[in-house]
Each structure stands twice: as C-alpha cells, then as structure tokens.
Amino acid sequence: MRKVCVIGIGETRMGRLPDRSLRDLIDEAGHKAIADAGIEKSEIGALYVGNFNASYLCGQGHMGALASEVLGLGSIPTVRTEGACASGSLAFRFGTMAIAAGFYDIVMVGGVEKMTHQPTETVTTGIASAMDYEWEAMQGFTFPGSFAMIANRYFHEYRDVKHEMGLCAYNAHQNAMLNPDAQMPKDVPLAKILGADLIASPLSLFDCSLVTDGAAFVVLAAADVAERVNGAHRVIDIIGTGHAGDALTLAAKPNITSFAASKAAAAQAYGQAGLGPDDIDFAEVHDCFTITQIINTEDLGFFPPGKGGDAVADGVTARDGKKPINVSGGLKAKGHPIGATGISQIYEVVTQLRGDAGARQLKKADIGLSQNLGGTAATCVINIFRGR
C-alpha cells in the first residue's frame, strides 16, 4: 500500500448563502483546492464527492458528474458517496484507498450541501431520512429527540453535564470568532447559552449544530508525487484511517452513551498509524450536539468514560488546553454543511498542521485527527494526519 498525502485544500465560507448555488459552491472550493495543490487539472485521475441530500433539497442527483463538469475535469471517473453526515469523510476515505492501492497518483475529493433555501420543516424531513424512516422518522422522531435521549441516558449513567455541554458551545463560538469561514462567529455569553430555550430536553438552542450551505475540497496524492509538487507547504501524511458502522436505529444499540462505530473506527485508525490517543495533538470531532462532543472524546480514548465533561470544565479541550477540540468552531459554530462537513474538518486539520491558521493557530500541531459521524452514530470515519 502506498503512502498518501494531502496536497491541496479549499473551502467556501459556511452559512446561509441564498445567492450561491451548488455549482457556485463547488466551483469556489474546488478551484481553491486545485490552485493550492499547484497541479494541472489534467493530472487528476478521479473525483469523489460527498453529498447527503441534494436530490431532495435541490432536485439534483448525479453529483459526481456535476462537480466534474463545473471544475472542468473532463472524462475522469466520478463517484458520489452518501453516508448521512459522514458523506464527505467517506469520499475522502475512498479517494485515499484508491491512491494507496495504486489506481491513481492524484485524486480530488470534496463535499457540498445546499440546505438553507428550504423551509425548516423541509430540511428537518430531509435530515430525518438519515434515521430509520419506518420505525423512527414516521413516528415523529427527530435527531434532536434522538440525541436528547442519549444525553438523558448519559446523565443517568454518569452525572448531569448540562453546564459542561454549555461550555462546549461557548468554546465553539469563541473559536469560530477566529475563523473567517465560520457561519456563527459570535461571542455568545455562557449565561445566554445555558439559559436558551429548550429544543428537546435537555438540549437547548445552543446545544444544536447549524443548518448550513457550503463546500470543501481537497487534493490527495501519492507520497512521491506530493514531495514533487507540494512546494512551500508542509507535507501532510495520512497516517491512519478507519471506517466502521453500527445499527441505524437508536433502539437497536445496546449502549447509547458510547458509540460502537467510533470506537471501532478509532481502533483501526490508531492501529494503522501506530499511535494512541495521547499522541494526538488536537482533533476536530463531530459535535452535531454538544453531548456528542463529550461522548466522542471519550470514545476516542482522550478521556475515560463519564469524564469528558470534566475535561471541558477543566479547560483541557479549549484552544489553549492540553487537548484542543474543534478549534475551527466545529459543527456548532463553523457550520454543518452535511455532505461537506467531513472535508471541512480535514481542511481545518491540514490548515493547523501547515501552521496557516492565523489567530487560531495552535502552539503544537504535528498530529491531528478528524472524526465524522453519520446518522445516530450509525457510520463513523476517522482520519489521522501528521505534518512532516
């Protein structure tokens, strides 16, 4: 298996972008990544595009071919990947595997979603298709309701971490204020976060991630190619990748305060990288809800079960803490453009490893991790990166 590197990154601003179409978003993020890689389009061997719901929300299927046309990539093979909120990371994994297996020397990977032009009811219905339609969505179950049940069970098994969940949101907004691409770079006082209206108890408004338009793309290359074309950039190696699944429904999971897919994917990625949780300098984790961030950091082995909230309260996960989490602002404040979310996480990890994050740049950023969930933790993709 060949070593694979990230040689180019590009993304749009995340947010409510009423004047931007799917084509516009793909065009901006994709061309930024190609320019950043310093390659010719003719060198790209294949294109993988993550997208969750354009068929329903935009009436647009066949996203791989659309992206290839927009970017002028000619007759190369294209694939659209769908794994709910992990759609982008699946595209990244497949692109990585294609180079590692020797099929291509350079591939392009991206994700895109356009959501905010639809009414809330339509978006909610579309997102609910990532859970079981017959047994959950048709019974009125929604993702806020699902993760509220997870939070309540976590409170029962460990302790009430509502305050620590609020701190997760507070940190996310503080970090987003330093990110020019963030959807919600607002200084939200902790008191306002903790006093916000309930959405599904115990989750309140600021415990929930955003509805977002946006796109992100990266260019991958075999290590020998990366060393030739990477120019002034630090070479970023993909040193571990993991992909695992779990039951689609919440009821079928034997444990809902730990996500089996995350733990299995993490074991794969750590094993491939030859590293453990203590070796990770920072991480972008899937904070679709604040309780999810806490559970994810435990499943990744950063903190013991039931202690993820303590780490937040003690400042360990803050930007200047020992294990910074979601320095980009995360899904909570940078935004959650579902098909693009996993690639946007990788964009931040690579930016940090390159030392290009500006005011939010971490002091120590040599090994970074991205963790991306789909549905009610039914799919998980984890990637580990190292800067040379």
Image: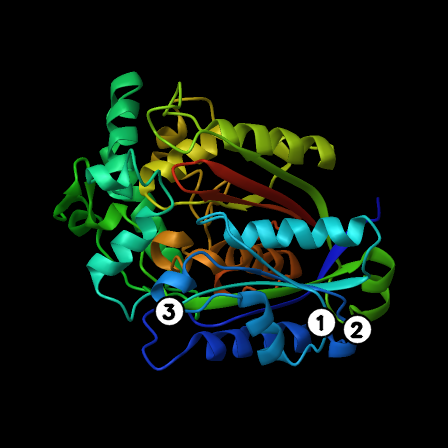
Q: Nearer the viewer, mark 3 or mark 1?
A: 3
Dot 3: element: loop
Instruction: Give me the residue at 58% from left, 66% from top.
Output: 64
- Is residue 362 something that shows in the picture? no
**Circle 2: residue type:** Glu
Instruction: Give me the residue at 67% from left, 48% from top.
Output: 385
In the image, farthest residue toward the front: 134
Where residue 81 appears, x then y in whole percent?
56, 54
Instruction: Mark 3 or mark 1: name the one nearer the start of the chain.
Output: 1
- Is residue 245 something that shows in the picture? yes
Residues at marks 3 and 1 touching, judged by CB atoms closer than 8 Å: no
Neighbours of disc 3 within 10 Å: few (<14), some (14-19), many (20+):
some
Q: Classify 341 as above or below 7.
A: above
Distance between the Cα atoms at labels 3 and 1? 30 Å
Neighbours of disc 1 within 10 Å: few (<14), some (14-19), many (20+):
many
Instruction: Mark 2 or mark 1: name the one nearer the start of the chain.
Output: 1
